């Protein structure tokens, strides 16, 4: 639902049905709403059967990459090794605040999803890594885990199944990069959060060098619903002509929009209707100028491009961007795109872990150049330099933070080049044209 | 991570108060019940080192920051070197390497909040706390204000964190009232 707003008639409430309902936070309240029935079912099934249901449902990763969840789980074999289940609750992608609300309002839904997943990948131990700033989600999820242990849902004999299931909550300490799956593993192991070179992939050597599956909070929270209501039920959400993107998705909407908040819609929803109808459109008297639809790391759309987009993995790719994390950032006609892109770049410059040269140097220099253009001190050559640096930052590093910094610069330059050039032109007339100072002051 | 002043000059971590160092004797954290708590945490992982972030949190929760003595205590408890602990600790922005104000205020100024006027919230906070500059602590030791990257509450612009509590939808106008409620 459109928390903190009332649900909109066009939403499809699955994950967010109980947002704002404090009773759903407790074990008794969660059970009264059908909670932990899916875990009971899953524990009575062979892990391969659970994997098959999730594969059949078409669920894909909701953290950004969109990898098919069931397929990811099927990489985990009954090989007798210690396996780990990891839940990524390090939500830090600018524009995204959906996992926060899941953990605040339905912590048991997450714990149940984590437990189902652990069983499905032959793991006895799961860790939920939550970013350090999320103090309330940390408290809620920790409390839910505690209640689940006390009720025998977790522990040595999970729900009387004879199987051991341990879930632990781990608090981060302030680092965007720890949302990258291998950086998160290093962080949990008590190291600096530097991403690891892949391969080996986590399914071969992940947390503590063991086969590991890592999924996003939203992905895991969808799992119990799928187990309970079936793969076929889940596949009904989506547009008929795109079977690759099914299910519901939470979109966090922020920036210059009338009703910011979280909204859950079926994938494939028309983006224009979403922005103007569900979210109430721009503030009175303003117009939407640009939209970043999937968190700060995906390409910026102009208003026209956004108007024609469909909200699923393929739909956003067709519009020239990505679904990403579902963090929708709206910019209206009062915004200076150069200033806002410079601010985004500064974010990446601050958050780079610094291990790859292209990223460490690229984010810092891009930030300096963007800020001098913003301050009216840029030159036309700077625009070429930005493109050249962005090229050197794309597809050349251990993780994609570097690419993510280049993305708003490249899409911004392509779509809002006139704003960059206007700032530079103002500068050039001051510096290079004799008499221009007096002329422009007049 | 670039932990110094950012390219645009805004401090993203707290600075030492007038360069002064804390000289009060260090009280160990991991004794009695707190030691048992740490042992419980260590038992969750196949390696002791995995308890490093939790152990640092325990020190900071007790003392308000992590001093060199705190680093040494954590290192001894987890059988790793103090240099390693410091190397890890300084990667993360939330551990304080210096004492900070009683009310440590983090203001999100990343793009989604920025387009909703976060910079004005920063200005109002600096003015009304009398901190003067980002990262500095007010003369009465009451406040430290820093800018922080995305707090993950973008729909409630501008969110700020005061110690462990979130305050959402802060405006320059609401700043005086929010501050007046802090002791």
Image (cartoon, coloured by chain):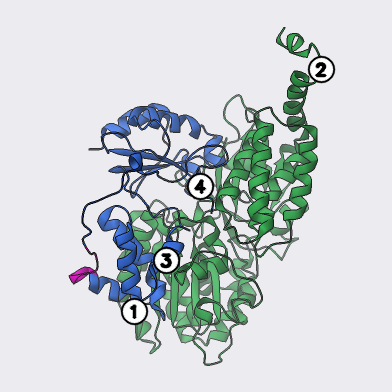
Image check: A219 left or right of B41? right
Q: Quick one: B11 or A116, which is closer to the camera?
A: B11
Please say if A21 is above or below A166. above
The chain coloured green is A
Please tell me how crowded label 4 is: few (under 14), some (14-19), or many (20+) other residues with Cα within 10 Å. Answer: many
Q: Are marks 3 and 4 on the same chain?
A: yes
Q: Which residue is mark 1?
A: B43
Camera-side mark, 2 or 1: 2
Q: CA distance from mark 4 to mark 2?
A: 42 Å
The image's mark for residue B150 is 4
Q: Which residue is mark 2?
A: A433
- Rendered residue at 44%/32% (across/down): B121
Please tell me how crowded label 1 is: few (under 14), some (14-19), or many (20+) other residues with Cα within 10 Å. Answer: few
Image check: B129 left or right of A232? left
Mark 1 and mark 3 in contact? Answer it, CB < 8 Å. Answer: no
Colour representing chain B = blue
Q: Which residues are magenta?
A: B28-34
**Disc 1 on helix, strand or loop?**
loop
The image's mark for residue B83 is 3
- Rendered residue at 48%/67% (across/down): A187
């Amino acid at each position: 639902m459109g928390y903190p707003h009332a649900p909109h008639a066009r939403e499809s409430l699955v994950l967010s049905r109980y947002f704002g309902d404090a009773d759903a936070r407790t074990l008794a309240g969660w059970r009264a709403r059908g909670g932990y029935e899916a875990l009971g079912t899953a524990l009575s099934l062979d892990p391969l059967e659970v994997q098959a249901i999730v594969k059949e449902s078409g669920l894909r990763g909701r953290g950004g990459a969109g990898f098919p969840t069931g397929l990811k789980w099927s990489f985990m074999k009954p090989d007798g090794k210690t396996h780990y289940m990891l839940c990524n609750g390090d939500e830090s992608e600018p524009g995204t605040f959906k996992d926060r609300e899941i953990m605040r309002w339905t912590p048991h839904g997450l714990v149940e999803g984590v437990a189902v997943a652990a069983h499905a990948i032959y793991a006895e131990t799961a860790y939920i890594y939550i970013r350090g700033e999320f103090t309330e989600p940390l408290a809620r999820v920790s409390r839910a885990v505690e209640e689940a242990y006390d009720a025998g849902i977790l522990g040595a004999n999970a729900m009387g199944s004879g199987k051991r299931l341990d879930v632990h909550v781990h608090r981060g300490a302030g680092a965007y990069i720890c949302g990258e799956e291998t950086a998160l593993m290093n962080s949990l192991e008590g190291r600096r959060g530097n991403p690891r070179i892949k391969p080996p992939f986590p399914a071969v050597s992940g947390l503590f060098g063991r086969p590991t599956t890592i999924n996003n909070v939203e992905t895991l929270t969808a799992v119990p619903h799928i187990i309970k209501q079936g793969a076929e039920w889940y596949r009904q959400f989506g547009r008929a002509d795109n079977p690759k993107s099914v299910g519901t998705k939470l979109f966090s909407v922020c920036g210059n929009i009338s009703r910011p908040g979280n909204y859950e819609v079926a994938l494939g929803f028309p983006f224009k209707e979403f922005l103007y109808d569900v979210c109430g459109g721009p503030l009175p008297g303003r117009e939407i100028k640009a939209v970043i639809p999937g968190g700060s790391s995906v390409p910026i759309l102009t208003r026209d491009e956004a108007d024609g987009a469909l909200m699923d993995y393929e739909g956003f790719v067709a519009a020239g961007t990505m679904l990403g994390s579902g963090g929708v950032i709206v910019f209206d006609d009062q915004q200076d795109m150069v200033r806002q892109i410079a601010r985004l770049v500064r974010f990446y410059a601050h958050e780079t872990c610094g291990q790859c040269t292209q990223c460490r140097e690229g984010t810092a220099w891009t930030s300096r150049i963007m800020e001098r253009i913003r301050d009216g001190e840029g030159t036309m050559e700077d625009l070429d330099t930005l493109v050249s640096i962005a090229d050197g930052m794309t597809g050349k590093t251990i993780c994609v933070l570097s690419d993510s910094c280049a993305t708003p610069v490249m899409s911004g330059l392509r779509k809002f080049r006139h704003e960059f050039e206007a700032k530079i032109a103002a500068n050039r007339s001051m510096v290079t044209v004799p008499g221009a100072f007096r002329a422009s002051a007049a | 991570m670039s932990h110094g002043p950012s390219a645009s000059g805004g401090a993203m971590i707290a600075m030492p108060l007038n360069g002064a160092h804390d000289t009060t004797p260090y009280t160990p954290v991991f004794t009695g019940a707190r030691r048992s708590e740490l042992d419980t945490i260590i038992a969750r992982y196949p390696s002791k080192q995995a308890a490093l972030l939790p152990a640092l949190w325990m020190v900071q929760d007790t003392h308000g920051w992590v001093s060199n003595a705190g680093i040494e205590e954590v290192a001894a408890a987890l059988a790793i070197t103090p240099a390693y602990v410091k190397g890890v600790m300084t990667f993360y922005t939330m551990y304080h390497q210096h004492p900070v104000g009683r009310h440590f205020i983090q203001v999100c100024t990343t793009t989604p909040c920025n387009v909703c006027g976060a910079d004005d919230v920063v200005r109002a906070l600096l003015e009304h706390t009398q901190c003067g500059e980002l990262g500095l602590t007010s003369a009465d030791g009451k406040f430290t204000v820093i800018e922080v990257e995305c707090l993950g509450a973008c729909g409630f612009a501008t969110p700020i964190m005061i110690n462990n509590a979130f305050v959402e939808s802060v405006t320059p106008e609401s700043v005086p009232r929010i501050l007046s409620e802090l002791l």
